[in-house]
Amino acid sequence: MLEGRGGNAGRRIEGDSVMADALNGAFSSLVTGVVEGVRPYLWWLVLLGVAGAVGWVAGWVWWLRRARTALGCRTVVDLVPSRDFDPSAEEIGRHAARLARVQVAAGWLPRRASGVRMRHWSDGGRLAARLEGPAQSAGLLQLPSFPDMEVLEAGRVGGAVRPVRFVGVAPLAKDREETP
């Protein structure tokens, strides 16, 4: 017998061992009954597991191919501002909200294929932008956002996705911090 600090708190009562033995016996008989009941259908359960795994892998491959197809067929829109272009904060907010809705307008696409790529460059001393997004949301990308900006459809991007490259600039080392 064990003695605890509080008198009977640490003592083992003989009725506890009888109850524990009864629960262990009931649990083991339950497990035995389930195993014996499932044994004739075991090959069906294995077949169901294999079919589920094959279905999951097939769905995953389909989703990856869907993303690759969507990335290969994107629409491109150029935004060229006029000389008097001076947007207000409200116009910039509306433009940002419209770009945020592109993913919803694209429909049921993988996340990596439903994003918008925005590129900026200087066109004759004026800042211009190019929006590239899913083909399903071309109508939303072509809507004019600002009153003093011209929207030009540049077409659709076909083939492989072209990454952004900086020509003549060596990449920074990952362990080195950039100093201003």
Image (cartoon, helix red, strand yellow):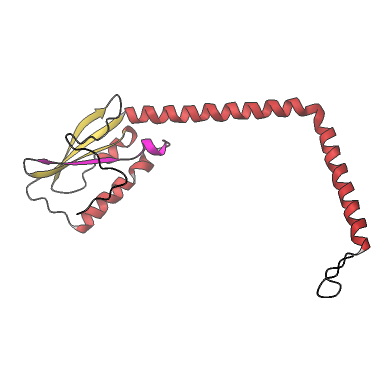
**Residue 81 shows up from this direction:** no
Instruction: Using residue 148 as the reference point, say whether residue 45 is left or right of it.
Output: right
Q: How many marks can you see?
A: 0
User: Residue shown at 18%/34% (left/top)?
Assistant: 167
Give left or right: position of 118 versus 9: left
Residue at 33% x, 47% y is: 100
Q: Which residues are magenta?
A: 108-123
Q: State the image quarter where residue 28 is shown.
A: top right
Give the answer, above or below, for where 14 lies relative to 120.
below
Q: Nearer the viewer, residue 16 or 150?
A: 16
Q: Quadrant of the C terminus?
A: bottom left
Residue at image location 42% in from the left, 29% down from the top: 66
Q: Is residue 67 magenta?
A: no
**29 on left or right of 60:** right
Q: Is residue 108 left or right of residue 45?
A: left
On-image quarter of the N terminus: bottom right
Q: Quadrant of residue 47?
A: top right
Q: Is residue 133 above or below residue 55?
A: below
- Please provide percent x and percent y for residue 73: 32, 28
Q: Is residue 32 visible?
A: yes
93 w.r.t. 49: above or below: below
Q: Quadrant of residue 35?
A: top right
On the image, the x and y values in percent for residue 157 come to 26, 28
Residue 136 image position (x, y, % from top left): 34, 34
Residue under the point 28% across and 48% down: 176
Residue 11 image offset from top left, x and y in percent: 87, 67
Q: Nearer the viewer, residue 161 or 154?
A: 161
Question: Is the residue 177 above or below the residue 77 in the image?
Answer: below
